[in-house]
Image (tube, grey):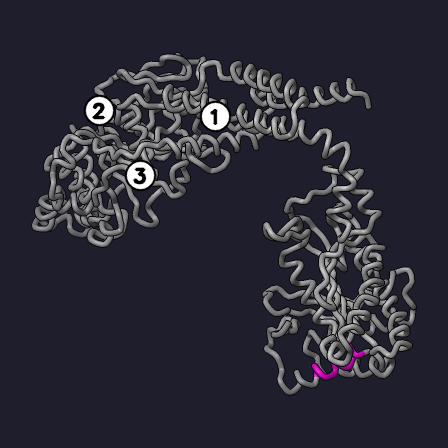
Amino acid sequence: MSTAIRHLSRSLFSLSILLFFILHATKTIEWEFIDALEHIAYDVRLELTIPDNKDDRIVIVDIDERSLSEIGRWPWNRSVIASLIEQLFDTYQIDVLGMDVVFVEPDDSSGLTKLRNLAQGPLKEAPVFLQTLAELEKKLDYDKLFANSLANRRVVLGYTFTNEYDSKIGKLPAPVFNTKELKQLNYKIANGYVANLARFQINAMSGGHFAMEPDMDGIVRRVPMLYGYKDQLYEALSLAVARIVLQVKNLSFKSSTSLKIAKSTIPTDKYLQALIPYNGKQNNFTYISATDVIHNRIQNPNILKDKIVLLGATAQGLSDLMATPVGNLYPEIEIHANLIAGILDNNFKSNFTYENITEILLLIMISVIMVSLLPLCSPLMATCITLSLAGLIIIINLFFWTVQNLVFPLATFMLFILTQFIFNMSYGYFIESTNKRYLTTLFGQYVPIELVDEMSKNLGNNFTMEGESREMTVLFSDVRGFTNLSENLEPKELSLLMNEYLTPMTHSIHEYRGTIDKYMGDAIMAFWGAPLHEPKHARYAIDAAMQMLKRLQDLRIQFRLKGWPEIDIGIGLNTGIMNVGNMGSQFRIAYTVLGDAVNLGSRLEGLTKQYGVKLIVSETTCKAAPEYFYRELDKVRVKGKEQPVSIFEPITLSNQIDENFALEINYYKLALRYYRQQSWDIAIEFFIELSKKNPSCELYKIYIARIRYFIKNPPKKDWDGVYNFITK
């Protein structure tokens, strides 16, 4: 390839990367992973620059565990809430009360309704009762007491919107805008609401919603300041409280994406959502227990005097905890407090007015610099240029963030710079010159050379070194009685024996596209389905296991001629979802598989000697390789697993099965059915007959012994036919 063509192809690839990011910047195509990175970058900047000043203008009256312990479980009767409100305003002289609580249903806990029913029924002619009821009615009408406590006080009741069409509970407060007059606006629209009883909302000064919608990653970063319902716009709880504090009767729009309240501007996105101006981490506001207010136990009354008070709950089961950039379990009530503080301080972060155009121009500028300079530089110089460029972008970004209160994309530029750098550095070296050598070094010890060639043709397309989950088949094999064998041979002979054993076994695995995971002394662990995807991984695994057993027969003859002991092996196969990839430490790393499905494969190998067979596969392997004819061995529960597993022995390919053996298997299936039905007498007759016809089959003898045990020690009536193994 000529230099001109090489430079042209490099430039075209760089241009493609630029186009990718421009499409995202213009929202033509939205890439969620870039948005997710931007969210992370936003959170990091917020975490690094968040102030640590406690705001004493806002106090949270907390329905906490101590309050529930002293007053009783929630909901409290309305007379208690009325007393709380009266204490706050009359005794402690607070300025405004915002309630992060909804009062949806009438309070009948006093029994007044029942007394009224008696007065209209059996006791309507009892003057003493009627007189007493008249005297008690004022004290027992808790809802009236609560409604009266709201009257003529600066109280904002909270409520919420829902997407349920049939949810229209309570009474909404007066809207702040009619959307017919604001057709150019976009906003969140609700289908229903859950609000306070009409008598409460009418008596309260105002009401505000506390609807919050997290971003795609579940983090709450913004709140809709206005919410739409049936051609009306309703304000947030924080906005309603701030309007009362600032004595602003009407809101106004500065633009389609910003609200004006007194001297403060609240910048919003196109859906009228404002970024929450977190003024500190959790507990940045003063908390007072509700029970201390009710019982007049506040030692310093000035802590509440002329303050903005928010009533909410942090008690377990009552609190609404949100995942936020400054805390994973952040109380919702503090989000309202931060919003109120932000309005009072005129301290909201906003996006650039011409963010998209600015972002595109910067992307083009960065691309021109990197495409022009990096191909001409050494790797070290290219790294320095890239780091300098990234550092400059970060400094500019932080300047706008801290000084101008502007939020500008950061992760997008970092990812773009990184992508361009990686592409330019890898173009010549990693892609053009070292693919096959890299793969041979990496996978030569695991897979046959044929697979390495195939992988080099599919680099980056059909496999990865990074950890991932996929369906695969794993094999475990082990030499039986290896301990005794090793004790009877000299170390040198043992080493020769193992080499001569492992070589043909490995060849069998490689022959059927398997990957050697590791040798563990005399044991072999291998898998199919990685690093290359292999749809027939289960079939190839069984083929390899069958080939291993055939080659073992030849080995036994060779070992006998050398005077070595004959060896026998057991093989277990399992198919399932496994984690595969490079795993290890900075000192040593290996391409391997992990997971429950892998552990089960090891357990199945250990069961081979229990059933007198050389190969056991799981039900998932059986289903994944229907080309084989299988004998079901048992249904077992291996150690460390709760779910039972059906285990099978592959016999041969289905089209090669002997008719007489097929009849024997059908007879065996009947015996197994009677065994699982606990029809011991019939089952044992079947197994005895099978053992006579095939005396070399250890499986039948095992079932005969097991049935005789069960006859003397019968299992429970609801026995599920599963045999439990308590050892590996």
Q: Residue at x 84, y 58 (%)?
A: 507
Type of the residue with mark 1: Ile
Location of residue 58 in the rendering, given as x and y in whole percent from the top left corner: 23, 33
Q: Residue at x 80, y 83 (%)?
A: 688
Check disc 3 and report the residue beneath it.
104
The reply, left or right, for residue 92 in relation to residue 446 is left
Check disc 1 and report the residue beneath it.
394
Residue 420 among those drawn in magenta:
no
Type of the residue with mark 2: Val
Q: Dot 3, crowdedness within 10 Å: few (<14), some or many (≥20)?
A: some
Residue 703 among those drawn in magenta:
yes
Disc 2, SS? helix
Q: Earlier in the sequence, mark 2 or mark 1?
A: 2
Gap between marks 2 and 1, in whole Å? 38 Å
Disc 1, SS? helix
Closer to us: 188 or 460: 460
Q: Nearer the viewer, mark 2 or mark 3?
A: 2
Check disc 2 and report the residue beneath it.
245
Quadrant of the drawing holding the N terminus: top right
Q: Dot 2, crowdedness within 10 Å: few (<14), some or many (≥20)?
A: some
- What's drawn in magenta, residue-wise? 698-707
Gap between marks 2 and 3, in whole Å? 26 Å
Gap between marks 3 and 1, in whole Å? 49 Å
Quadrant of the drawing holding the C terminus: bottom right
